[in-house]
Image (cartoon, rainbow, N blue to C red):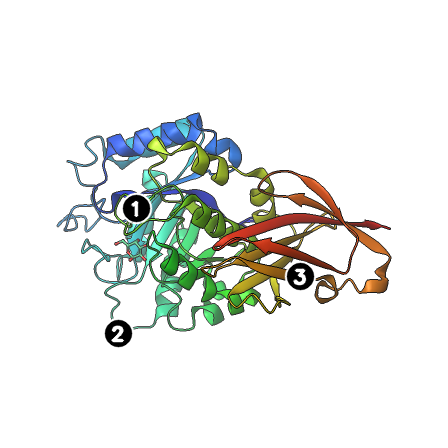
Amino acid sequence: MVVNKAPMGWNTWNTFGPNINEKIIMEAADAMVEKGLLDAGYEYLVIDDCWSLKQRDPVTRRLVADPVKFPNGMKAVADYIHSKGLKFGMYSCAGVRTCGDYPGSFDHEFIDAETFAEFGIDFLKYDYCYRSSSTTGPILYHRMANALRATSRDIVFSACNWGKDDVYSWIRSTGAHLYRSTGDILDNFPRVKELATSQFDKQCYNTPGCYNDMDMLTVGMFGKGHAGTEGCTINDYKIQFGLWCMLGSPLILGCDIRNIDDESLKLIKNEHLIAINQDIEGRQTFQISSKSWSCHDAAIFVRKLENGDFALGMFNFADRAATVVAMFDEVGYPANCGLKFELTDCFTGEKSICDSDSLSLYIESRGTRIYRVKPVKR
Ligand code: GLA
């Protein structure tokens, strides 16, 4: 199965942790449609850990949905999600137990894949806790990928081993469509920055069909919910969303979308940024240096886009404002190229022209500017 673009959706974990139930899922499905998230591209609704009973069915050895949390069973949940035009995702783990201490799929991969297919899932997140030492990580991901491929459904396989065991070197061979490259996100700026920067030198591994997943977004959480912690500001969320879009990470929302504020909603529906993330050419993002004495903690990324444009993302992570300078020569446009640059500001939609060999911007503390750039004849 080919997955042409980094998957987009919503997952229960960041906000609800273990406290999930049918009502929350149905309300989230309603919200995804009513708030225009499905139309913006967010199509997967994923139930994370803690959905099953603590033990398998003693006779069939199958996983069983917790009847208190899901009184009508998982098939009914799947049907509701599908009736909304959404796709349905669930969670299991390559280990003996899940990270939340529910039964994992170890040694039950094929029967679990069958169960998931019977539920009607379209996406499986597959975690890495309590891994048996009797075999290797690659074999465990091969097993579940093979089990999913043996079902009659198209199921996106979302590996989640937090970047361990040199996952970059083997995950693509297993059949996974996305792979978590980081530990768990928390809703605070230092943690978000830590996760993103850990992937700055890993962009060569993010390829069409198998995407580097930097974890679920915290945009809109403002410190509330399971992964809440100190919370972020809306400007921090602009950096976060901008980085995830520029670096081509899957966009899996984690806030309580039922009650999301207007500014966060506008941000996650930003068409310019989503278009960069979902660009069909799927080019590797590259980093250029920031030429500025005043800027000690900045990053500039470029991503070539399908129609000949490129995206230019300039990030100031520092605690003070700074001038950040991008040299077009480093993008492959020398001063003698005979071109100037039409810029569209992805946050405001404003257009401007840059007829120079560099773009120099004064960016506030923890701020970002992202442009879609069209090179045109001078
Ligand atoms: C791990 C994963 C998280 C989440 C939890 C659930 O920590 O990395 O994304 O799925 O398990 O227990």
Query: Which dot marks residue 77?
Result: none
Asked if disc 3 is less than 8 Å from ligand 1, the answer is: no
Q: CA distance from mark 1 to mark 3?
A: 34 Å
Tell me which label, 2 or 3, sits earlier in the chain: 2
Say few, some or many: other residues with alpha carbon within 10 Å of mark 1 (under 14 / 14 to 19 / 20 or more). Answer: many
Image position, residue 36 (x, y; %): 48, 29
Query: Which residue is drawn at the image coordinates 23% and 36% (left, top)?
Result: 21
Marks 1 and 2 in Cβ contact (< 8 Å): no
Establish if 4 lies above or below 324. above
Which tag is nearer the camera, tag 2 or tag 3?
3
Query: Which dot marks residue 223?
Result: 1
Q: Secondary structure at mark 3?
A: strand
Image position, residue 262 (x, y; %): 43, 32
Query: Which residue is drawn at the image coordinates 42% and 53% (left, top)?
Result: 157
Tell me which label, 1 or 3, sits earlier in the chain: 1
Mark 2 highlights which residue?
134
Mark 3 highlights which residue?
326
Asked if disc 1 is less than 8 Å from ligand 1, the answer is: no
Q: Secondary structure at mark 2?
A: loop
Image position, residue 352 (x, y; %): 72, 43
Image position, residue 100 (x, y; %): 21, 54
Q: CA distance from mark 2 to mark 3?
A: 50 Å
Marks 1 and 3 in Cβ contact (< 8 Å): no
Q: Is residue 77 visible?
A: yes
Say few, some or many: other residues with alpha carbon within 10 Å of mark 3 (under 14 / 14 to 19 / 20 or more). Answer: many
Q: Amino acid at mark 3?
A: Ala
